[in-house]
Amino acid sequence: MRTLTARLAPVLGLLLGTLLVLGPGQPVLGPTASAATSVTDADACSDSATFLMGAARSDITGPAAEVGMMGYAQVAQKTEGIHLRLYSRAFVIASPCNGRRVAVVSADLGEMFQAVKQQVVERLRVKLGDVYSDDNVLLSATHTHAGPGGFSHYTLYNLTTFGFVPQNFEAIVSGIVDSILRANARLAEGSLRLSSGDLRGASANRSPEAYLRNPESERARYPDNVDPRMTLLRFTRADGHEVGLINWFAVHGTSFGNTNPLISGDNKGLASRYFEAGEGGLLPGGPDTFVAAFANSNEGDVTPNILGGTNGGGANDFEDVAISARKQYDFAAHLWATAAMPVLGGVDYRHTYVKMDAVDVAPAFTDGARRRTCPASIGVSMLAGAEDGPGFGAEGATCESVHDLWSQFTCSVVTTPCQAEKPIVLEMGGMKPYPWTPEVLPLQLVTVGPLALVAVPFELTTMAGRRLRDTVLAQLQGTGVTDVVIAGLSNAYSGYVATRDEYARQDYEGASTHFGPWTLAALQQSFTGLAGALRDGTPVPPGPTPRDLRKAVVGLQPGVVFDDKLLWVDFGDVAEEAKPAYARGDTASTTFWAGHPRNDLKLGGTYLRVQRRLADGTWRDVAHDGEGGALYHWQREYCVPTLACSLVRIDWPIPADTAPGTYRLVHEGNWKSGWDGRVHPYSGSSRPFTVR
């Protein structure tokens, strides 16, 4: 039996680290522990139910006008307003039993690019020293396809945005850093509870033919061709205050289609809004008293459009988003209410970088032969898009099928046997002076008691995720880990991962598997090493250092030069007035002469307010642009004598439960002077109108 001194050592170390990092009077935070946790420390944590926890949410909404959107790769799809603001939701978990902590972030982004992780960790190090590093910061994206792009340092992901967009990148990085710092500062003693269950009817496999190519014996183990499992972690402070939750459920953020111009967190962002509104509310600039993150998992071949194509069951995209969000929210609320399993154990993690285009894969992970991954490339079927975001052509284009029809494509079975069935349309890995997508990629494994998070910089298909989970769980037998979750789109991004059998069909997911048919096998091999090291309490090598391209990025999109208007109006004046009266179910609307939204992103604020007049004559907010209840639309107005005019329309679909009374629509913005370049605030309001 260990001595009392040995049992108290990690706790004393955590307290000492607090005083060294932050000084007296601050919450217990503790330093980052060494790369390996000893077996004795693991023993000390085995029956511990006490954690330190903190959560925070920060606004990361980028430019709401004239920036290409990230997800569908449609050049014509540019931001023109806001349905929901985008947020970074951060959770910091520390275990006093071993002095280790981890920051887990779910951000409303299409992808989590490597440049973002690099600069987040860099800025955290400036603020907190060695408390955080690549090893214990897990950044993931919800995979919304309705956010502004241009925040990667790699060319492929900036093509449709005409290069890098510094304003969007800064909003994302600074917001994520802020959410982690505030979550870290809120650390307080509490407990965690874990719950999971199967949510059916909220997702469908968009490439079922490829899925059927997996071995029948393997498919027979699962009743569904998608992963219906939702896993939820509930955070409760020792004083009874509910801190929040994070859950993982595999589904694409494609309820909004590829013609949508409004910024939104899509189904997961709206599900978060539903939960947060019920647990204290979400106010612009107000305290985030409860944080609910709906994170993603192995969603590579999973769509929310359960009726096929782009049809999610609603009359339009807004209803599709609401239907998907409500299903996820309702099930998460059920798991929240029934979460009874206390989390026992500590926090631990392993992290390494792998050069994914040159992995020698042992026969134990392949078809019995030694295999190797390939320089990154995408296939012809990637151009076709997926069913919920169709592009050009059709899926399923293999070298054999296109050889006679498209002789201009060089088939990889001839020129690059490594890529097997894939007819290559673009070789990102061979571009100069830098590859167009990253090849040195982070792999991370985090455990919180019985929960293991497998953080991958890819979109894994359903079966690929199942295989990787099984691989990790097999290595962690005997450690107390019972639940393994794929934390997809984490820490960087480099396409999809399909199984070898799915890859052979070359649907969208297979064509988008950059590093060839044995990518999944390479991941299984790498995570076998990470999981084994975590189990044994041994360190892992850091791997090769990824390149930092911040000085090499190019942006071709100009900023706002100046804002103009008609001579006889002012910024904020009404161009099209609201009606005098509306009924519930109607949409109240007002259009204003406006400035360009890129003049001020209104982070932590709002471009619009729906207000109700109180009995004393004052006005109280009832909606804003962060919650999906009112919509902010921007459009370019070609007025004389310039092309620099903007109009903003506020639409408020009046809910059926709206209290009768007098309301108004308010717009807040900023305009830029063409004379001195200064930016000036303005506001305007509609006429008061009644709601019957």
Image (cartoon, grey):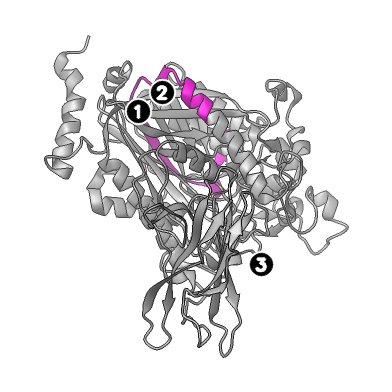
At label 1, the amino acid type is: Thr
Q: How far apart are marks 1 and 3 (CA)?
A: 45 Å
Identity of the residue furthest to the front in this view: 615
Q: Which mark is residue 76?
A: 3
Q: Distance between the residues labelled 1 and 2?
A: 8 Å
Q: Which residue is tagged 1? A: 236
Q: Are marks 1 and 2 in contact (CB under 8 Å)?
A: yes
Q: Distance between the residues labelled 3 and 2?
A: 45 Å
**Residue 676 pos. (x, y %):** 36, 86
**Callout 2 environment at 10 Å: few (<14), some (14 to 19), or many (20+)?**
some
Q: Which residue is tagged 2? A: 193
Compared with residue 313, is residue 44 higher up or lower down, i.e. above or below? above
Residue found at x 46% / y 80%: 570
Query: Mark 3 or mark 2: which comes first in sequence?
Result: 3
At label 3, the amino acid type is: Ala
- Asked if residue 475 can be seen in this view, the reply is no
Span shown in magenta: 333-362
Compared with residue 144, is residue 92 higher up or lower down, i.e. above or below? above
Please state which of the two labelled residues, at mark 1 or mark 3, is closer to the viewer. Answer: 1
**Residue 656 pos. (x, y %):** 60, 44
Query: Mark 1 or mark 2: which comes first in sequence?
Result: 2
Q: Residue 222 carries which label?
A: none
Residue found at x 61% / y 82%: 638
